[in-house]
């Protein structure tokens, strides 16, 4: 990334942290009191962002699997960037879902009193397993360059790189071979762990009996396709920005195009089955998506800017890396609308007739609009993730230019 562009994005991230700090301080001091969601709509914008980041990690996860489990050479160049992306996205993801908890201080109870009959416990276990695996994978992928950088007299911060390399002062072919085998082993472990992690998140929604729109066998499948679509689009965009590999970008663009078509087909299927079944609560939830207060997020952001325009670009400009990258960026930037329309409408339907007339309190309404506090906190978390990613891309060897996946020899 060019220095000017890098400085601009770092400046935006710092500005986001400053602006969002007000909301974050309010959240930490007053708990969930400043938020707009309540008892009938207990999950709001932060859960939508959680699902967005969950999906964004899936594309990078898939690339590391293709590179180091199936040993597909063309994806080796993306290995470091993908592993590091998974790591940063997981951190943002856990911050969002932790902030959504009413009592964040009780999160330790997952460790001391786990209930293995609960999918939430398994989500906690699998999340931490993913975090550990990808932290180790990133380390072993970049260790060779950390050693080399710690010995480079032209490079500042050599002591820092020596510390990150855990004091290792040489790196030869034997080290490379051993680290590659470790990365391969970690990737083998991450394959079932990752599939269970993403599948468990989808199943968590699908098993909720009183949520008819979520309570469908289609939900886990939609989750997986949505994750691969948004995550794949992110990796294609990052490949264009950081690696400038035109062939890889256009190849990823074609994969994103297929995923987009499958996702739109499944989404249309969800609407068709929902309306044909004519179950009142399902029809009400679908009507909220298509004709409710936030119809514009569905029609304009998701279908228009996030689907139709990228579809045209990916079909008719498929050989232009720049156009493909911007089509993928559009998908990523508008995918929050998909997650928002997944989370809110099913919650925003009264499940008992006349319930809205029984009790009256602002927290006992199904109308939900994210307030300023929720947006400020979201800006803070996203800015933190962006800043860590940018600093890592500049000061850590996570962007490699060689075709072997960057596990260089450093004697």
Image (spheres, grey):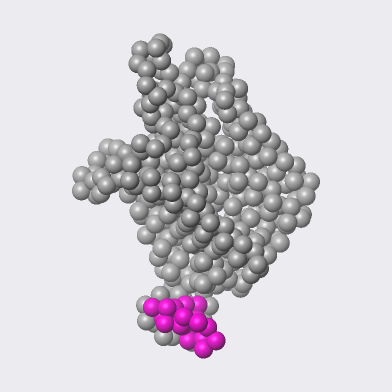
Q: What residue is at 48 percent from the left and 40 percent from the top?
A: 372
Q: Position of residue 407 (x, y in %)?
A: 51, 74
Q: What residue is at 33 percent from the left and 46 percent from the top?
A: 29
Question: Does the magenta-highlighted stretch encompass residue 155?
Answer: yes
Q: Main secondary structure of the magenta part?
A: helix
Q: Position of residue 311 (x, y in %)?
A: 71, 41
| Quadrant in which residue 42 is drawn | top left
Q: Which residues are magenta?
A: 145-163
Give the left or right position of residue 42, taking residue 77 as reference: left
Is residue 238 in sight in this rendering? yes
Question: Does the magenta-highlighted stretch encompass residue 171?
Answer: no
Taking depth in this image into account, of 257 and 326 the one nearest to the observer is 326
| Quadrant in which residue 131 is drawn | bottom left
Quadrant holding the N terminus: bottom right
Q: What residue is at 46 percent from the left and 21 percent from the top?
A: 349
Which residue lies most toward the right here?
Answer: 316
Rendered position, 308 above or below 78: above
Rendered position, 144 above or below 16: below
């Amino acid at each position: 990334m060019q220095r000017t562009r890098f400085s601009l994005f770092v400046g935006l991230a710092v500005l986001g942290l400053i602006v969002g700090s007000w909301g974050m301080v309010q959240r930490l001091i007053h708990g969930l009191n400043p938020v707009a969601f309540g008892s009938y709509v207990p999950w709001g914008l932060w859960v939508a962002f959680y699902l967005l980041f969950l999906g964004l990690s899936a594309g990078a996860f898939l690339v590391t699997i293709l590179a180091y489990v199936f040993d597909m050479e063309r994806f080796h160049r993306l290995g470091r960037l993908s592993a590091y992306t998974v790591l940063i996205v997981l951190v943002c993801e856990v911050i969002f879902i932790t902030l959504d908890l009413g009592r964040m201080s009780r999160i330790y109870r997952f460790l001391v009193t786990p209930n293995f009959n609960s999918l939430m416990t398994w989500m906690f276990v699998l999340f931490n397993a993913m975090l550990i695996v990808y932290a180790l994978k990133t380390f072993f992928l970049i260790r060779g360059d950390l050693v080399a950088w710690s010995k480079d007299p032209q490079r500042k911060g050599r002591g820092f790189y020596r510390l990150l390399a855990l004091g290792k002062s040489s790196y030869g072919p034997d080290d490379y071979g051993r680290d590659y085998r470790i990365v391969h082993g970690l990737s083998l472990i991450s394959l079932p762990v990752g599939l269970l992690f993403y599948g468990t998140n989808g199943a968590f929604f699908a098993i909720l009996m009183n949520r008819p729109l979520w309570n469908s066998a289609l939900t886990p499948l939609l989750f997986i396709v949505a994750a691969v679509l948004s995550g794949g689009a992110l990796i294609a965009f990052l490949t264009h920005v950081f690696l400038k590999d035109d062939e890889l970008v256009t190849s990823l663009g074609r994969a994103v195009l297929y995923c987009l078509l499958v996702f739109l087909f499944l989404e249309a299927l969800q609407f068709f089955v929902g309306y044909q079944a004519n179950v009142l609560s399902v029809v009400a939830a679908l009507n909220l998506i298509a004709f409710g207060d936030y119809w514009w997020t569905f029609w304009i952001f998701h279908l228009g800017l996030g689907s139709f325009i990228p579809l045209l670009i990916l079909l008719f400009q498929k050989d232009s890396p720049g156009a493909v990258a911007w089509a993928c960026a559009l998908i990523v930037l508008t995918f929050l609308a998909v997650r928002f329309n997944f989370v809110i409408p099913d919650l925003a339907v009264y499940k008992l007739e006349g319930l809205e007339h029984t009790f009256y309190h602002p927290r006992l309404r199904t109308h939900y609009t994210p307030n300023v506090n929720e947006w400020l906190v979201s800006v803070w978390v996203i800015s933190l993730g962006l800043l860590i990613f940018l600093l890592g891309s500049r000061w850590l060897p996570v962007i490699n230019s060689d075709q072997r996946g960057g596990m260089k020899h450093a004697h």
